Image (cartoon, grey):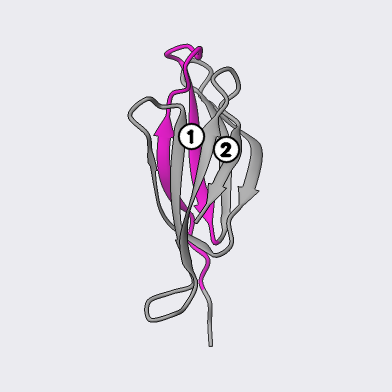
Amino acid sequence: MVRITALSILAAVMAQGQTSTSVALYASVGPELIHYQLDVDGASLVKKESVTVPESVQYAWPHPSRRYVYVAWSNGSGADHHGVSAFRIDPKSGHCIRTAIR
């Protein structure tokens, strides 16, 4: 069996207190949610920290306040381990801070 790991860009959330040229970008590979800092003016993308959820990330979406991001994860269709994790977004750095797993 061949497994292909794909990078999926999940959500770009501008945290409060960041400039319009600096954006927190979140992407996933498997169960890892990675925070990148995108500097539009400097044309750079810098990997910051990452957090791990119990299974592969399926979908992520920001709360309307942009202070939280919700991450749906699963071990696959027809499988038995699914859930949603919530992370608070640090308004200055964009770092994800785990708040809940369901």
Q: Considering only vertical position in the picture, is 17 above or below 47? A: above
Are dots 2 and 1 in contact, CB under 8 Å?
A: yes
Q: In the rendered image of this protein, does residue 92 appear above or below residue 53?
A: above
Query: Would residue 85 be counted in the magenta stretch?
Result: no
| Region of the chain picked out in magenta, as a range | 4-30
Closer to the camera in the image, 29 or 83: 83
Specify few, some or many for label 1: CA neighbours under 10 Å numbering under 14, 14-19, or 20 or more: many
- Bin the neighbour count of mark 2 within 10 Å (Cα to Cα): few under 14, some 14-19, many 20 and up: many
Q: Nearer the viewer, residue 48 or 78?
A: 78
Q: Assign a secondary structure to mark 2.
A: strand
Above or below: residue 77 compared with residue 53: below
Specify the amino acid type for callout 1. Leu
Q: In the image, residue 54 lies at what x, y percent?
A: 59, 62
Q: Residue at coordinates 51% horizontally, 51% vertically from top-left?
A: 28
x 48%, y 34%: residue: 25
Quickly name the residue at label 1: 25
Report whether 58 appears left or right of 29. Answer: left
Q: Which residue is mark 2?
A: 35
Residue 40 point in image, percent of width and height? 46, 20
